[in-house]
Image: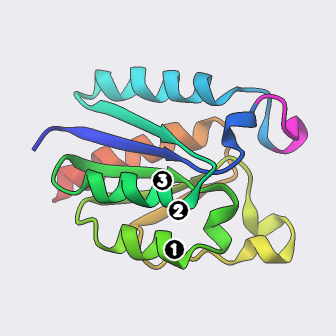
Amino acid sequence: MSKEILLLSGPNLDELGTRSPEIYGSTTLAEHVERFTARAEKDGFSVRHVQSNFEGELIEAVHAARGTSVAIVINAGALTHSSWALADALAMFNGVKVEVHLSNPAAREPFRHVSTLAGVVNGSIAGFGATSYELALDAVRRLLELA
């Protein structure tokens, strides 16, 4: 198996940089992906990025990662709080899984306090802005070293 990390970006993340910069910052999704990929490559990983505003496409990407990726880093956006189907797909993936949020959902509206993904991922990183992606990569690397 390769040392590929699947980086998944959910609905509306393609609007980062202009969408609520006071919450999500001014960094675009392309910039997040570029930094994540450059850092991952230094650690010997390749990155495949999939962004979709459609739940089914994200689920298909998780299915395709089985047998090809060693880890999934996912920022599911609002699907974090509602997608049991995405949680089921992630549960079938045997590699490392890290949930990422730029903002801190626990400090926001009550509906954001629930993660349907929390029970099927190794852990969640939230509230550190762009640094959340770097911390997720550190977590992936460390968890793979322990495996």
Residue at 48 percent of width and 69 percent of height: 86
Disc number at residue 124? Answer: 2
Disc number at residue 57? Answer: 3
Within 10 Å of disc 3 (Cα), the crowding (few <14, some 14-19, many 20+) is some
Residue 22 included in the magenta stretch of the image = yes
**Mark closer to the observer (1, 3):** 3
Residue at 80 percent of width and 76 percent of height: 111
Q: Horizontal and vertical percent for residue 139? A: 39, 50
Give the magenta range. Answer: 17-23
Residue 94 included in the magenta stretch of the image = no
Q: Helix, strand, or loop for circle 2? A: strand
Distance from Cα at disc 2 to Cα at disc 1: 7 Å
Distance from Cα at disc 1 to Cα at disc 3: 20 Å
Residue 112 is left or right of residue 128, and the answer is right
Residue at 61 percent of width and 74 percent of height: 115
Disc 2 residue type (three-letter): Ser
Q: Which is nearer the eye, 126 or 94? A: 94
Disc 3 residue type (three-letter): Glu
Give the quadrant of the N terminus.
top left
Q: Horizontal and vertical percent for residue 14? A: 67, 36
Q: Mark 1 points at which residue?
A: 118
Disc number at residue 129? Answer: none
Q: Helix, strand, or loop for circle 1? A: loop
Q: Helix, strand, or loop for circle 3? A: helix
Asked if disc 2 and disc 1 are in contact, CB closer than 8 Å, the reply is yes
> In this view, which residue lies farthest toward the left?
1
Quarter residue 91 falls in = bottom left
Mark 2 or mark 3: name the one nearer the start of the chain.
Answer: 3
Mark 1 or mark 3: name the one nearer the start of the chain.
Answer: 3
**Mark closer to the observer (2, 3):** 3
**Mark closer to the observer (2, 1):** 1
Q: Relative to 84, does residue 126 appear above or below in the rendering?
A: above
